[in-house]
Amino acid sequence: MAALATAALATVTRSNQNCKMKADQPKKAEFLREGDKLNKELLSIERDKNMLLFNKKSDFRREYNILEELEHQLTKNRKAEKANIQQKLGRIYNNVKGLQRQLKHVKPTPEFVDRLREMMEDAEISINAFKEEQRQKYEELLREEKTATNEINALEKKIELWALGTSATGNTPKQGMLVVDKKTQNHLPPGVVELDKFLQQTGGKQGGWDVYDHQEFLKLWTKHKGKPSYIDEVLDHLPDRTREDILQHEKWYQEFLILEAQKKESIQEWKIKKLQEREKILAQKKKKPEEGLTTAILQHAAAQKQKVEEERKKRLKELELWKRQKAIEYSMKQAAQLQAEEEKEKKKQKERQRQCHIKLLLEDYSRQKKEEEELLRFEKKKREEAEREEKRRIAAEEILKFQERDLSKVVFKIQEKQAKEDEKIEKERRLREKLREKVGMNVPRDPRRLLKPTKVWEERTKEIGPEGSGPLLHIPHR
């Protein structure tokens, strides 16, 4: 069996190897061509890079020294990684070659099969470990490549913005910075003044960031709805920003939103207040008109009053419309929330009903299963009892048969023995009769013979000489 298993294993392994080699031949050629092409591109890029880095006449030699040190370190790491990979590949190659050598000299023994299995497992483990390690390294390199690409794109966009800013704006002030006269501040609402002061102190409407960075921050912050998960994505898109910068900018933006909302409320209150003041002034003028007003002045005042009244009505109408819209939005929001809660409650109710239904089904199933088990157990017990009763009946019948057979044998043996004894007695009787017929016995009657000693007694009563007087017939040995 071991020989057959070994031979079959060797045949299957060789056939699989041949099929794999034929199937992988085009892929191998394509892989080698792609590797050769990439190697040529790498050599060309390294040649161009070395011309910039190692040029001693370059104006940026001092800055290139840092890149040169980094290049040496990366080259050293690449060489070490290459040696490590070659060592692991050599170990895998030796394992596979050893397995191939063993397959050429097959031995029909269990020890050889076990050794072959161990070698195959070792080769498979080493190959899988090498693949997993390389996969992790490739994933890490892809992440680093993505980060580097994002950094390069961000720097390119910044450089483009710098070029556009210097060419278009010239000596214009920074974007987002507001310059407000102190006299004007006294006539502005407090919310507007507070927001302007906040923007002046924190670097404008972008919080000290440039337009691109602030737009990327707003886009990702809105995408994640302000959740902390947006920070990692912002770090990927803005590699020159740290986590602390992003958290600080988020804090600034939240404060900016609060101040902006306060500004809108303050402007609305200021407008209402101004309208009330105008109405009050017009009412006072209506009660006490000046005596020297001409018809033109009165008409102008009436027109101005009508204009103010129309503006007031318009503002009140807008305010009423805004309040109505807000009320509608609030009611719609409440209705949507109520509907969502009702849907949620319906889902919970359906889930509870489903769970109750499932519970009832499970209980019914458990009860039926228990009844079936009880019925099967009862039937099994009844069947076993019937089998035992049948066995007892069969055993009793067999015992009775054995007893009858033994009794008949005993009776037969007794009869046979009795017949033999009768035959023996009959034979002895016939023999005595024959002897009696052949030998005639005529012994006289002598009652004195009963008192005579026998020959044996007479020999015993003979006189015996002293001990040791006779010849020595026996020598005792110890």
Image: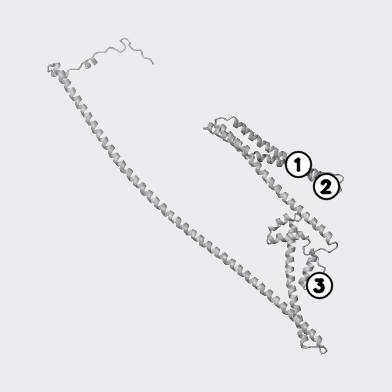
Q: What kind of residue is marked 1? A: Lys
Give amino acid for label 2. Tyr
Residue beneath disc 2: 64
* Disc 2: CA contacts within 10 A as few (<14), some (14-19) or many (>=20): some
CA distance separating discs 1 and 2? 25 Å
Disc marking residue 185: 3
Q: Amino acid at mark 3?
A: Gln
Q: Are marks 1 and 2 in contact (CB under 8 Å)?
A: no
Residue 416 drawn above or below residue 470:
below
Residue 205 appears in the rendering:
yes
Residue 297 vertical position relative to residue 224 in the rendered view, above or below: below
Identify the residue at horizontal 72%, vertical 79% (top origin): 313
**Is the C terminus in the top left, top right, bottom left or bottom right quadrant?**
top left
Among the two numbered marks 1 and 2 on one chain, the one whose residue lies closer to the N terminus: 1
How far, Cα to Cα, is label 2 from label 3?
53 Å
The mark that comes first in sequence, 2 or 3, is 2
